[in-house]
Amino acid sequence: MADPHQLFDDTSSAQSQGYGAQRGPSSLGYPAASTSPQAAFLDDPVSNMAMAYGSSLAAQGKELVDKNIDRFIPITKLKYYFAVDTLYVGKKLGLLFFPYLHQDWEVQYQQDTPVAPRFDVNAPDLYIPAMAFITYVLVAGLALGTQDRFSPDLLGLQASSALAWLTLEVLAILLSLYLVTVNTDLTTIDLVAFLGYKYVGMIGGVLMGLLFGKTGYYLVLGWCCVSIFVFMGLGKSITIC
């Protein structure tokens, strides 16, 4: 089994070996070329020193940029929330629609660190909320098109409205937790992830409304509302003490 602390699979070595095997002079059937002007340039000590100095400057610049970005945007933390795979996404979508069948809601830890989402279906992620948000805006545009009310401006209005409501929900929960002085392990990013899961049910409701009219819309939307209520109640309660 892969290391739970490893967020993504490392395929760089396999790719480099395959690339070398395909691109090597001997594998193509051509003899190795004699020393070219480019090779002579690379063998020059001055050029080697310049290349090394340039690489050092590039590494220092990348490190400086990463440090400044992390001050405002926690890139390292965000990588954890996007460490998903196809199997995790399928299980998570099933959990969102049928949370009643799930028994173990505990988030898995290893050495006081939560494992990557692709190893634990209970772990929050931002991949599904982000994709669901974009899909919801597009599906809403499709629904408006079937009613002959579509315009590009409405897509932007729909996206900004959904984003504004999500921001208000996060701020309201943070304020509530502060006022009642509740200790919790939930971070702001966790709240965004949990609240973003509701777009999955909203997409299902709009699609069923397009296919089966108002009856299908209200039935599916009602089911998804109850499901997300159960999911949020059981999924977040384990992190509040």
Image (cartoon, rainbow, N blue to C red):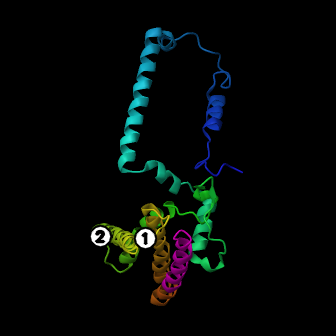
**Left or right: where 191 falls relative to 94:** left
Question: In the figure, 231 relative to 78: above or below?
Answer: below
* Farthest residue, direction front: 181
Rate crowding at label 2 as few (under 14), some (14 to 19) or many (20 or more) other CA atoms within 10 Å.
few
Task: From the viewer's side, name the closer residue of 164 and 207.
Answer: 164
Q: Which mark is residue 136?
A: 1
* Farthest residue, direction bottom: 215
Q: Which residues are magenta?
A: 221-241
Q: CA distance from mark 1 to mark 2?
A: 13 Å
**Left or right: where 124 falls relative to 142:** right
Q: Secondary structure at mark 2?
A: helix
Mark 1 or mark 2, earlier in chain: 1
Question: In the figure, 212 relative to 138: above or below?
Answer: below
Task: From the viewer's side, name the closer residue of 21 and 120.
Answer: 120
**Within the image, what quadrant is residue 108 found in?**
bottom right
Residue 142 coordinates in the image, percent (x, y): 40, 73
Identify the residue position indicated by label 2 in the image. 157
Going by the numbered disc 1, the residue's amino acid type is: Tyr
**Within the image, what quadrant is residue 191 found in?**
bottom left
Residue at x 48%, y 83% (from the top left corner)? 221
Asked if labels 2 and 1 touch by Cβ distance under 8 angstroms, the answer is no
Going by the numbered disc 2, the residue's amino acid type is: Leu
Residue 101 coordinates in the image, percent (x, y): 66, 78
Rate crowding at label 1 as few (under 14), some (14 to 19) or many (20 or more) other CA atoms within 10 Å.
many
Task: Say whether residue 85 is magenta.
Answer: no
* Farthest residue, direction right: 1
Task: Say whether residue 226 is magenta.
Answer: yes
Residue 39 coordinates in the image, percent (x, y): 52, 13
Q: Secondary structure at mark 1?
A: helix
Residue at x 44%, y 61% (from the top left corner)? 189
**Dominant secondary structure, magenta:** helix
Residue at x 58%, y 50% (from the top left corner)? 7
